[in-house]
Amino acid sequence: QSVELIVTNLRAEACSLELDQLFEPFVFENPLSKRNGLGLTLVAALAERLDGSIEIREQSTAHGFNFEAVLTLPRGDEAVRKAPAPATPQRPTTRWSDAISKLPDKITVAIVDDDTGISSAIEKILSLVFQKHLQFGCIKFSGPEFIAEIDKLEFFDAVVCDVNLGAVSGRFIYETLRERFPEQLNSFAFLTGERLSHEIQAFLESSGCPYLHKPFDAEYLIDLVIELIEKGATKRSS
């Protein structure tokens, strides 16, 4: 059984983008908007996590859009909360199938970003690819939180860190790891804004770590994280 929810926004203006694009991260029609373009991405991720789906349709009889969500209802015996039995991880049938099939069965990714909207969106994107097929964990930190916990942290399969953090910069985190846990830098990557100073650009290139410009395509993020996990696992086994 399922339930369909339809929410209508009659005040929304016409959109020049393809409607399916609106669910992609960091997409917004006005390039000068102060929004980060993550709202509908999170909505779509939550719907999928609940075994549902969501679509957006333009109204034919009036201005605005319909948001149509379909959510699966649990049966009576499924509604009772109980600990799930351990399951053998399923392998995905996506373009990442071959790469993910070679990854460890358990992976943990750290996201270091002071913007909780960005870190939550990254977590949702990665969860959609990994969580149903591997034992996937994602830990989110602000810059100061990561530094405060650094001596207690175990090795992460991948670390994605914003360069432009607040009180603690991504560069400081990189240098701290280089001094204390250099092996973690084998699976470390930066997130950056679109515009970089010459100093930051020179630092990124000298660090040897890959970096991803925001806004970024979700597929590029997934490719990057898989690459980090593979590289880290190779270095640890050698």
Image (spheres, rainbow, N blue to C red):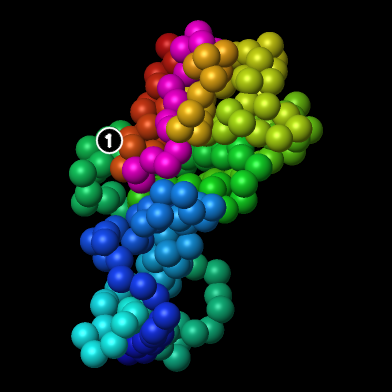
| 3 lies above or below 99 | below
| Label 1 residue SS | helix
| 125 lies above or below 184 | below
Q: Residues within 10 Å of mark 1 (few under 14, many from 20)?
A: few
The residue carrying mark 1 is: 99
Residue 12 place in picture, x, y as percent = 39, 75
Closer to the camera in the image, 231 or 63: 63
Which residue: 21% across, 51% down? 93
For the view shown, which residue lies furthest in the top direction? 206
Question: Looking at the rendering, in which quadrant would you find the C terminus?
Answer: top left
User: Does residue 14 appear to the left or right of 73 in the view shown?
Assistant: left
Residue 213 place in picture, x, y as percent = 43, 33
Residue 16 place in picture, x, y as percent = 26, 61
Closer to the camera in the image, 78 or 199: 199
| 76 lies above or below 33 | below
Which residue: 63% across, 26% down? 170
Q: Quadrant of residue 83?
A: bottom right
Number of marks drawn: 1
Membership of 205 in magenta stretch: yes
User: Is residue 230 something that shows in the picture?
Assistant: yes
Question: Looking at the rendering, in which quadrant would you find the N terminus?
Answer: bottom left
User: Is residue 131 something that shows in the picture?
Assistant: no
Closer to the camera in the image, 66 or 220: 66
User: Does residue 81 appear to the left or right of 51 in the view shown?
Assistant: right
Residue 123 place in picture, x, y as percent = 50, 50
Membership of 32 in magenta stretch: no
Which residue: 27% across, 59% down? 17
**Magenta segment, which residues?**
202-218
Q: Amino acid at mark 1?
A: Ala
